[in-house]
């Protein structure tokens, strides 16, 4: 009796796993799940992704070592990095993220509020390693530890900054105050009919 009961449980587990695999493959191969960024995630999917991300960062950031406090010049350096690369998606005190960033899924968090949810060590880990399938790049491959530490120092202080504080730290960086997309790259030189190369026209003020 006990042996039959155990065998029944084992068969039930195997059957459940096979059904789960069948559902997974069906969704993957039929294209049933809408991957369009214009379509909001279902609540269950959003919760699963968000919870997995938070737990993963929490688990892996334990080895990050940072000073207990950050010098003012380190925070200012981080503010400069933020104004150059991060403000377009994450906003700043008194400045909303750019409109195009709102079309990303998941939407990048507005760090003037969301940064308070993370420890400095977790922020460092996220900046260094990025987040898969979120649009958040890994900066560790092309930024040294000092630069990532500076950015971490600034982001950690973002929730307590006023718009005036932010402008003072960024030194009036146009990117920090304009709120627009990064400037487009210049057009490549054009070849004229006689084979000479013409310089691209200067951008209008």
Image (tube, rainbow, N blue to C red):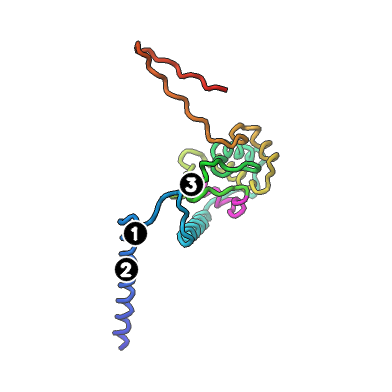
Outermost residue, top side:
194
Callout 3 environment at 10 Å: few (<14), some (14 to 19), or many (20+)? some
Question: At which x and y percent is residue 79?
Answer: 61, 39
In magenta stretch: residue 80: no
Label 2 crowd bin: few (<14), some (14–19), many (20+), radius 10 Å: few
Give the class, few, some or many, for how many residues have Cα within 10 Å of label 1's Cα (few <14, many ≥20). Answer: few
Q: Position of residue 188 (x, y in %)?
A: 42, 23
Q: Secondary structure at mark 1?
A: helix
Q: Which mark is residue 19?
A: 2
For marks 3 and 2, the one nearer the N-term is 2
Give me the C-alpha separation between circle 3 and circle 2.
33 Å
Residue 78 sits in which quadrant? top right
Say which residue label 1 marks. Answer: 27
> SS at mark 2?
helix
Name the residue nearer the viewer: 64 or 56.
56
Q: Is residue 162 above or below residue 31?
A: above
- Asked whether residue 203 is in view, the answer is yes
Residue at far front of view: 38
Horizontal relation, residue 43 to residue 114: left or right = left
Residue at 69 percent across and 43 percent down: it is: 162
Percent of width and height locating residue 175:
58, 34
Magenta region includes residue 125: yes
- Residue underneath mark 3: 104
Q: Nearer the viewer, mark 2 or mark 1?
A: 1
- Give the residue at x 32% y 81%: 6
At numbered mark 3, what does the secondary structure look like: helix, strand or loop?
loop
Question: In the image, which residues are magenta?
Answer: 113-127
In the image, residue 43 sits, relative to residue 128, either above or below, namely below
């Amino acid at each position: 009796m006990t042996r039959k009961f155990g065998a029944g449980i084992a068969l039930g587990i195997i059957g459940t796993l096979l059904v789960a695999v069948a559902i997974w493959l069906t969704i993957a191969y039929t294209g049933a799940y809408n991957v369009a960024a214009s379509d909001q995630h279902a609540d269950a999917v959003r919760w699963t992704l968000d919870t997995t991300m938070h737990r993963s960062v929490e688990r892996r950031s334990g080895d990050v070592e940072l000073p207990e406090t950050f010098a003012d010049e380190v925070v200012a350096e981080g503010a400069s990095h933020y104004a150059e690369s991060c403000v377009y998606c994450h906003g700043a005190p008194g400045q909303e993220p750019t409109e195009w960033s709102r079309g990303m899924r998941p939407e990048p968090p507005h760090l003037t509020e969301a940064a308070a949810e993370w420890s400095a060590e977790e922020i460092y880990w996220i900046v260094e390693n990025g987040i898969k399938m979120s649009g958040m790049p890994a900066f560790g491959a092309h930024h040294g530890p000092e630069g990532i530490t500076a950015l971490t120092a600034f982001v950690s202080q973002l929730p307590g900054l006023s718009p005036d504080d932010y402008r003072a730290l960024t030194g009036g960086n146009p990117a920090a105050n304009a709120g627009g997309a990064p400037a487009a790259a210049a057009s490549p030189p054009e070849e004229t009919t006689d084979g000479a190369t013409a310089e691209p026209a200067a951008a209008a003020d």
